């Protein structure tokens, strides 16, 4: 193991992230992975999900399961954002008009 590998392993940010990852909870009200994949395919989105992740994650050696979960979460986040924009346009209101009302104008994902 080289100097950089040892330093990266001992990185306090990485340790904190791993601890937070182990305590994560499933997202509530997010579209399912199947719905997200269907929306992604329907829209023909060419955005690579890893481009939606925080840049700091590129420094971590993610497991295949972590990588898949982060990809799904990134796709879900984009679909939720699109949902909010569509709902606001449908209701002819600004996006910030419902900041504190999470269920206002929300499309239900199944």
Image: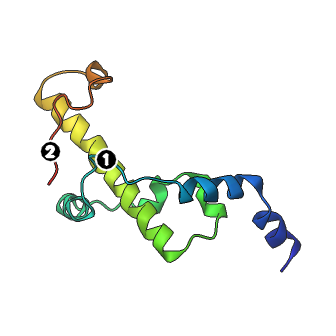
Report the side of 81 relative to 34 (left or right): right
Q: Badge 1 local density, few (<14 within 10 Å), some, or many (20+)?
A: few
Location of mark 1 (residue) = 28
Determine the CA span between mark 2 and mark 1.
12 Å
Q: Would you say 86 lies left or right of 10 here?
A: left
**Residue name at image x 61 percent, y 62 percent:** 58
Name the one closer to the observer, 18 or 35. 18
Q: Which structural element holds mark 1?
A: loop
Point 53% across, 54% down: residue:
23
Q: Nearer the viewer, residue 84 or 63?
A: 63
Residue 44 visible in the snapshot = yes
Residue ID for mark 2: 108
Quadrant of the snapshot with the N terminus: bottom right
Q: Is residue 76 left or right of residue 18?
A: left
Q: Is residue 64 above or below residue 60?
A: below
Residue 48 in view: no
Going from N to C along the chain, the mark reached first, 2 or 1, is: 1
**In what element is the residue under mark 2?**
loop
């Amino acid at each position: 193991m080289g100097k950089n590998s040892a330093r990266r392993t001992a990185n306090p940010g990485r340790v904190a992230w791993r601890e937070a990852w182990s305590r994560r909870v499933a997202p509530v009200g997010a579209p399912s992975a199947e719905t997200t994949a269907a929306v992604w395919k329907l829209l023909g989105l060419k955005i690579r999900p890893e481009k939606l992740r925080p840049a700091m994650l590129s420094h971590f050696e993610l497991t295949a399961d972590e990588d898949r979960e982060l990809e799904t979460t990134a796709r879900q986040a984009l679909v939720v954002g699109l949902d909010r924009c569509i709902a606001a346009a449908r209701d002819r209101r600004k996006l910030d008009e419902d900041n504190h009302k999470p269920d206002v104008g929300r499309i239900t994902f199944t």
